[in-house]
């Protein structure tokens, strides 16, 4: 009999590293995901929801789903790309902050999300 230990799942997951904001999303009529995505359109920033109530917004540095483990490397992100993301987050910080509770943080964050 084979016993499997550790994390077992029938669903696909993805690992990621993102530069940007990590926080708890404020869910109300003024802060819909659609309006946040409209605000970010054309900025190179994206929104990634993670389970346990955390939301990430920023420039994806690394993303790989469990289905992608075929030896291929993810696309590289340059320091110039990160500097542009930092500038864009600073420029939009006041507008973006209404989408998050006050305890959000800006930095490099990692996690696992469902696909």
Image (tube, rainbow, N blue to C red):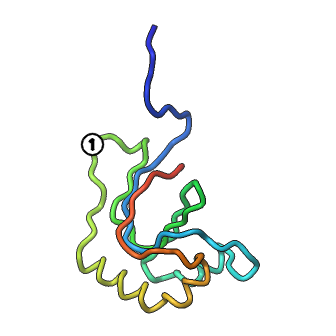
- In this view, the residue in front, 63 or 107, is 107
Q: Please, what secondary structure does the residue beneath circle 1 have?
A: loop
Q: Residue drawn 58% across and 55% down?
A: 52
Q: Using the image as rendered, state which of residue 42 and residue 62 is in the foreground.
A: 62
Q: Is residue 101 above or below residue 73?
A: below
Measuring from the top left, give residue 21's x and y in whole percent. 46, 74
Report the residue that reaches farthest toward the left: 79
Left-right relation of 76 to 106: left
Residue at (44% x, 21% y) in the render: 4
How far across and down, in percent of the image, does residue 102 sit? Answer: 56, 79
Q: Position of residue 54 (x, y in %)?
A: 55, 62
Q: Position of residue 49 (x, y in %)?
A: 55, 61
Place residue 25 in its image quadrant. bottom right
The residue wearing badge 1 is 71
Residue found at x 35% / y 41%: 69
- Packing grade of label 1 (10 A; few <14, some 14-19, many >=20) is few
Position of residue 74 relative to residue 9, above or below, is below
* 33 horizontally vs 88: left or right: right
Where is residue 24, by image quadrant? bottom right
Image point (32%, 40%), residue name: 70
Question: In the figure, is residue 13 to the left or right of 18?
Answer: right
Residue that sits furthest to the top in the current view: 1
In the figure, is residue 55 to the left or right of 26? left
Work out which residue is located at the far right of the displayed protein and give it: 29
Query: Does residue 65 sit above or below 103 in this rendering?
Result: above
User: How many labels sit on residues?
Assistant: 1
């Amino acid at each position: 009999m084979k016993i499997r230990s550790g994390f077992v799942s029938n669903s696909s997951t993805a690992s990621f590293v993102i530069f940007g904001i990590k926080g708890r999303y404020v869910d109300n009529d003024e802060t819909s995901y659609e309006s946040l995505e409209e605000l970010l359109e054309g900025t190179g920033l994206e929104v990634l929801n993670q389970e346990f109530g955390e939301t990430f917004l920023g420039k994806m540095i690394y993303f790989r789903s469990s289905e992608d483990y075929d030896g291929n490397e993810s696309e590289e992100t340059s320091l110039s790309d990160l500097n542009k993301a930092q500038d864009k987050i600073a420029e939009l910080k006041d507008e973006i902050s209404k989408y998050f509770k006050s305890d959000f943080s800006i930095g490099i964050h990692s996690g696992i999300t469902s696909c």
